[in-house]
Amino acid sequence: MFTPELVDAAVAKHGRGELRRRLLPARLVVYFALGLCLFARESYEEVIRMLTSGIPR
């Protein structure tokens, strides 16, 4: 399981966190890369839609 804490720790360990607020935070980019692997037949737009479907706008 890739918990938010695990992903944040991996991002921090490799010094890849944000220096300023971005449209796509590092954690979401990690989940996006994993989603692209898991849903290789889907478009980028569909994968990001699946990842963000429960986030209020």
Image (spheres, rainbow, N blue to C red):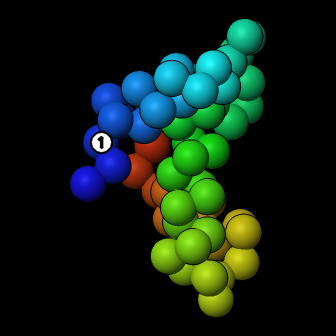
Toward the front, the furthest residue is 14
Residue pictured at 40% horizontal, 50% vertical: 54
Residue 32 image point, x, y percent: 59, 55
Residue pictured at 30% horizontal, 42% vertical: 3
| Pick the front one: 1 or 20 | 1
Residue, disc 1? 3
Amino acid type of disc 1? Answer: Thr
Residue 53 drawn above or below residue 23: below
Residue 3 drawn above or below residue 38: above
Residue 43 image point, x, y percent: 71, 78
Q: Label 1: state its secondary structure.
A: loop
Residue pictured at 50% horizontal, 76% vertical: 38
Toward the bottom, the furthest residue is 41
Quarter of the image with the N terminus is bottom left
Residue pictured at 54% horizontal, 29% vertical: 11
Q: Is residue 25 left or right of residue 9?
A: right
Residue 48 image point, x, y percent: 61, 59
